[in-house]
Image (cartoon, helix red, strand yellow):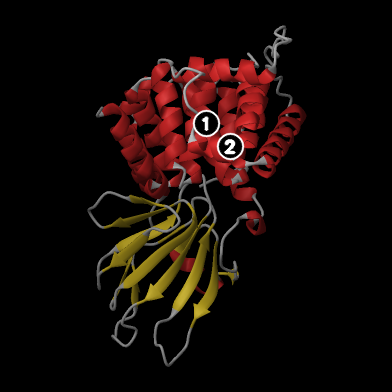
Amino acid sequence: MANNVINAQNPSQFRQPYPLGEKNTAFSQYFIGQSYLSLVSNNKNLNVPMFNVTFEPSCRNNWHKHAGGQMLIATAGVGYYQERNKPARRLYPGDVVEIEPNVEHWHGAAPDSWFAHIAVECNPQVKGGTTWLEPVEDAYYLKVCADAKAKYDKENTVLSEKQKAIVSMGNYTAQGNLYMLKQALEDALKAGITVNEVKELLVQAYAYCGFPRSLRAISTLDELLKERKAAGITENYGKESSDIQDKRDKYIRGAEILETLSGVSKDAPKASYAVLAPTIDTFLKEHLFCDIFERDAVSYKDRELFTVSMLTALGGVEPMAYGHMAMCLHIGITPQQLSALLNISEMNVGKFYSDPIREVLKSLTDK
């Protein structure tokens, strides 16, 4: 498989919890692409050998089997695992694969992402070790990866290509995954999102996942734009936000925008957090719903799709996801579109993040 810009990334830029280790030269004949190996545990008294294996994009090992079986614990990036005659399974950090003895399988990185997992040798006392079989050829590998990723393609047609790109931007911005964000930003520009729209959304990110995530995302966009300029690509910057003519108090303007988004009267009783900490209520109304949402370079619908995508990838913020999904439904985003958003999020960041938000959506639509 030909190398591309993705494969040229320095492996030290790939964030993972365990050391990269050295190039896996001892087993390179059984891999397509570059892998790295680092010993995690080889305590003879425990007798559970464990290794951190890192794969560059598109790297995978041959079909093989283990006489004693094996466990894989995904720790970073996106990968694939497949048993003989079964569909490939897409892997995300936290996923565990239990491989029975003598089951033929392969595993490795997704075509567009680095991947790392802990490999646990089970029953190392069993004779036979690892039996290496034929390579997983390019055409086959690409097909099974595409088949796994296309699981939701038909359902996702309710979102435009622009909206799909907004979801991926939100997912990767929230998690600080700059490597995948850079690809998502390029996809967004190709889908027709203007540079000014992208900038508006990345600025908005500060209100949901903090200034550090927002600033790193904007820096990633800056880097991408410089690379595209050097390649002779002319950007569509699009319109900038209009000058704000409304000079009323920002708190009042923000409260009215929130009322428009939610359908809940601005005079309704305040949430308990706003009663306990009135300052946060002021910041929400003035800085978020006025300073940001009042800017018209991006529509309310696109801002809310971006927001829910960020909240999904953050995890542990179900009450906020509930509120913003309710806003989405109120302003005309359909349950099917929100389900598609979660399908894309599942492909980007995994079921650990998407499943709790599916329950939130279900609670809203079951009313």
Q: CA distance from mark 2 to mark 1?
A: 7 Å
* Image point (60%, 57%), residue name: 15
Q: Judge from the rendering whether residue 61 lies leftward or rightward of residue 179; answer left or right.
A: left
Name the residue type under label 1: Thr
Q: Which one is earlier in the sequence, the residue at label 2 or at label 1?
A: 2
Would you say residue 109 is visible in this rendering?
yes
Residue 103's disc number: none
In the picture shown, does residue 114 fall above or below 243?
Answer: below
Residue labelled with disc 1: 307
Residue bearing mark 2: 208
Task: Estimate how packed mark 1 is, as few (under 14), some (14 to 19) or many (20 or more) residues with alpha carbons within 10 Å.
Answer: many
The residue tagged with tag 2: helix, strand or loop?
Answer: helix
Q: Is residue 250 above or below residue 136?
A: above
Note whether 197 is above or below 135 in the view shown.
Answer: above
As drawn, is 221 to the left or to the right of 95?
right
Residue, far bottom? 45
Left or right: residue 365 compared with residue 217: left
Disc 2 packing (10 Å; few <14; some 14–19; many ≥20): some
The answer to whether one can see residue 63 in this image is no
Relative vertical location of residue 57 with respect to residue 213 in this rendering, above or below: below
Where residue 40 appears, as percent x and y from the top left, is 51, 77
How many marks the image carries: the answer is: 2
